[in-house]
Amino acid sequence: MPPAFLSFAIWIPVAAGLVVLAVGSRRAALSRMLALFGALAGFLVALPLYIGFDATASRFQFGETSSWIPTLGVHYALGVDGLSLWFVLLNSLITVLVIVAGWRSVEKRVSQYNAAFLIMSGLLNGIFSALDGALFYVFFEASLIPLFLIIGIWGGPRRVYAAFKFFLYTLAGSLPFLLAIIYLRVQSGSFSLPDWQNFPLDHGTQLWLFFAFFAAFAVKIPMFPLHTWLPDAHVEAPTGGSVVLAAIALKLGAYGFLRFLLPIVPDAAQEMAPFMIALSLIAVVYIGLIALVQEDMKKLVAYSSIAHMGFVTMGIFLCTALSLEGALLQMISHGFVSAAMFLCIGVLYDRLHSRQIEDYGGVADVMPRFSALFLLFSMANAALPATSGFVGEFMVIMAAAGKNFWIALAAGSTLVIGAAYTLWMYKRVCFGAAASEKVRALSDLSAREFALLLFLALAVLGMGVYPFPVTEATHTSVAELLRHVTTGKIP
Amino acid sequence: MELKTLALLIALSPLFGALVAGVFCRSLPRGVAAGAAIFGVSIAFFGSVLVLLDVLAGNTFNGEAYQWLSSAEYRFSIGFLIDPLTSLMMLVVTFVSLMVHIYTLGYMRDDPGFNRFFAYISLFTFAMLMLVMSNNFLQLFFAWEAVGLVSYLLIGFWYTRPTAIAANLKAFLVNRVGDLGFLLGIALVLAHCGSLDYAAVFARAPGLSGVLFTPWAGASWSLPTVICVCLFIGAMGKSAQIPLHVWLPDSMEGPTPISALIHAATMVTAGIFMVSRLSPLFELSETALSLILVIGALTALLMGLLGIVQHDIKRVVAYSTLSQLGYMTMALGVSAYPVAIFHLTTHAFFKALLFLAAGSVIIALRHDQDMRRMGGLRKYMPLTWIVCLIGLLALTGAPFFSGFYSKDAIIEAIALSSIPGAGFAYTAALAGVFVTALYSFRLYFLVFHGQERFAAAHKRAPDSGHGEAHGLSFGEKPREPSRAVTVPLVFLAIPSLILGALFVEPLLAGDFFAQTFADTAHGEVMRGWRLHFPGALAMGLHALATPVFWLALLGAGTAWFCVLFRPEVPAMLGRRFSVVRAVLENHYYFDRLYQKAFADGARALGRGFWRAGDTGLLDGALIHGAVRFAARCAAWGRALQSGYLYHYAFAMIAALAFFLAFWVVPAWGASGFPR
């Protein structure tokens, strides 16, 4: 039997988290080292997934199945395809970065902090690799808890408000989802996702299932108008929390669309596509304009995240191979770029304890290395070609123009709006004369911060210059997904 | 060497220079960074010469370097197309870039950002080469945005100056508006041709003619027109055509060498290059060509007029660039692609020369750019004076100078065209000749002749510049800058002088471009032009008797009259026609309109959405409203459970009464009283 890499990717970080928790915060240095070790181990066991992945096969790979709750028919069933593979890799990688990023800036309850991230990393991997509806739901709900704690304990002044808002929003969304899962189990007699994907459903059923899935996943992404929890959560979350929230947690919703909504209720998805595209365009234009007037850097990037995720949902519901792969690339890229943006803001916050744009100005003079990297990430956020930020948006716009010119035009407005809010922020933070004595006294990146951002910079550039390997591994899975959507399943 | 390897070497060597100078810009000694950059660009230049020779020998290349992405039935690649157009552009780009690199050694000598500057201009050279060498739309767009990025970085090179960082943001955003059109054009090309490779698209282009585009139910437009207008919007951004021109004058906030390289000679001509490169598409739509012609004519004339009222020496040259780009655009509009490229080439040399000469004056006057504080400089800077005069004569189109051949060809081509708008364009082009001569010689007389006004300059507070003191100190005389500055001037003056006469025959009358551009019905213009072409020398002689020449002479004379002979006349005219003056001095109010409508408008809209939508409706009314509702329900529930026995007893009696009234009594009523 081949090694159970997916189980490793889930349980090694969780186990490492428990060990770190046991070590306790008194031995902060040791717990940091152990956390880093655990995160690295988690990433290393995820690597074989990429190396051993067979891009030509449309089935789920690295599968593991064993019975978990026999009376209910729940299985511990794992597997990845060309879509979920990337999220497991991205999540395992981001966990390492988050542990490193919190090395100096987190002083309070160090071991609990690191443990929360490790456990969450394992749970998130569980979500991305679960092939059993009940198992997925368990992971999906469980992953809320560490993030809730991270925001609620290590967050800013309004952390409790933000944490509860985040928790209630997502919980409210996932209750209809639970009903949908139970309904599907009762009707089909199985919890297996592949079974559900082939199970015929009539039009009315598909429609209410669509809204059940929509409630759970649209909140996570988040789609307009269910997005107002995100800016609050980001503003209050510690840097690491924001990074994981933006880079991974937001992708859960889009992943849910790809894994549940499109293949299980394809006809409803087709029917509701115009509605979903309209919401996506609102995210791009309306949210983009809101981002323009934000005074808090984190809030600005949070709103820009929503706008970028608008491209993801648009790509998913345009439903062509080009747009779906574009959505996927946009998600991966956003994982890097938003992580980097939040880390950059964290770097500034650690020094000046302010996220208000007006408190900055002239940072380029005192922090040249930081400013160079921050500019690169800002440009990636503004979708400059040769950065990863361009690839997904380009593909989605290309696909949109094939369907409707005006959708492409509205989506393309991000070229102007996205550049406006990102670069205007950059201008006010980095350019100009030094805003105050405090700014003049800022120190440039430490070696640890520099290494972290440089790594992300290389990832952003690498994916922008040569995205070929990513799409190559997804073609078959996307084709399989499209097959489900185009054939439909109304009996 | 194989052409593909050579192409790769040419493109990548400036990138190498940029990386060396940029990545280590804080640790490398200046000589090494500059050396690496100059080395990279030199290789690119000599390689480009080899490529041109190869192309002259009849070789071309079209092939893929690597595959960027594939998806569904589409594949997107990075690749090179080497043909006559490309090879000429490569030569222009690398030569001007090399000259600017050398010039920078002198101009930026004392700047703390010396290494960074070299990194940027080498990176720009790389991006621009990728742009002209591309064999597909994707890479064209890549490089298109990349040159925009470097332009952004260089306009904001002195990033502590408020004016510079306002200008670079503005430049980026205005260009992005153009890029949006460009990207949509590309998207339509992909949607209807199934590929982004030039060769594949051009092969399928004739099939697009007559295809209709349905913007909404009931309407139908010509698809080629929609595609071409979208693509041209991109060109309008980059090549600064009305109404997307507003960024270029402000871009003069950047150091002068990049004004020469990017905002005059190369990057701003990318739009001209793009339309020429895509001629098989543009030839499909006469409507689009007409639009191009009219936009070009408006830009050529209106922007030239603004050049007359500027005081900043660089801004005069900047407005002249806008106006000359308008001329090139007009040439595109009448399908005279070789003429547009020819003017692009001559303009690259004489405009780079003019900017660098202006830079030389600026150094000599210690970073004072106001022409009102210049005058009489010919005594102190003879070399700058001569080369500047050459550049201005070329710009004005004085016979036998390089600019004459290209500009005259444009005017003749417009005269030969019958496309709608040609009559208007012809008038604008002729009026533009007068205006060009007027602002050119106004600059010339103000700077090099007349009273020496720089001596008084030190009394004034500096109103622009990097925050150091500006202008000469008392009694100090301007002098010619170092050789790093003057040598490039000479090397640019030579082609400004002779290039036109040398190239006019092979480029326009000969068969250098025989296979390059689409040849359709509009090709009449070029064929007609060739028919009339009498040879370079005769063309110059013949011009002396044409109205074009007399208009130019009149313009120069007017400049002399207003600057040297009767200096009080301009002020008097300004008072007399104060409305005209106000319009010109406010640049036709474009900036103010855009600021109000787009910059302020977008912010007001965003603020409105945020207050009313996100915090008002969604968070305030719905989310917090739901929370308040839940709290109120809970409060009622709490009130019910008071713990007092009489409350509960009352509730029981009330409920009993309720049931009796609504359930028991009606039941009696229905079935009668029980007996």
Image (cartoon, coloured by chain):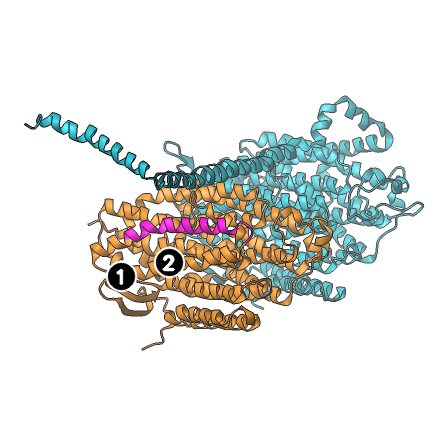
Is residue B11 found left or right of A70 in the rendered image? right
User: How far apart are the alpha carbons under marks 1 and 2?
Assistant: 16 Å
- Please name the amino acid that badge 2 sits on: Phe
Q: Quadrant of the N terminus of chain A?
A: bottom left
Q: Is the same chain shared between marks 1 and 2?
A: yes
Q: What is the span of residues highlighted in magenta in the rendered image?
A: A156-180
Which residue, as the protein is rendered here, is positioned at the far front? Answer: B645
Mark 1: few, some, or many residues within 10 Å (few <14, many ≥20)?
many
Magenta stretch, overall SS: helix
- Rendering coords of residue A121 (x, y %): 44, 64
Asked if residue A188 is positioned above or below residue A418 in the image, the reply reads below
Q: Nearer the viewer, residue A120 or B268?
A: A120
Which chain letter matches label 2?
Answer: A
| Quadrant hosting residue B392 | top right
Which of the chains is orange?
A
Q: Nearer the viewer, residue B67 or B297?
A: B67
Mark 2: few, some, or many residues within 10 Å (few <14, many ≥20)?
many
Is residue B674 found left or right of A465 in the rendered image? left
User: In the rendered image, which residue does mark 1 sit on?
Assistant: A192
Q: Nearer the viewer, residue B66 or A92?
A: A92
Is residue B577 found left or right of A415 in the rendered image? right
- Label count reads 2
Labels 1 and 2: the sequence-earlier one: 2
Which of the chains is cyan?
B
Q: Is residue A343 magenta?
A: no
Which residue, as the protein is rendered here, is positioned at the far right? Answer: B475
Which numbered dot is residue A140? Answer: 2
Q: Is residue A173 magenta?
A: yes
Label 2: element kind: helix
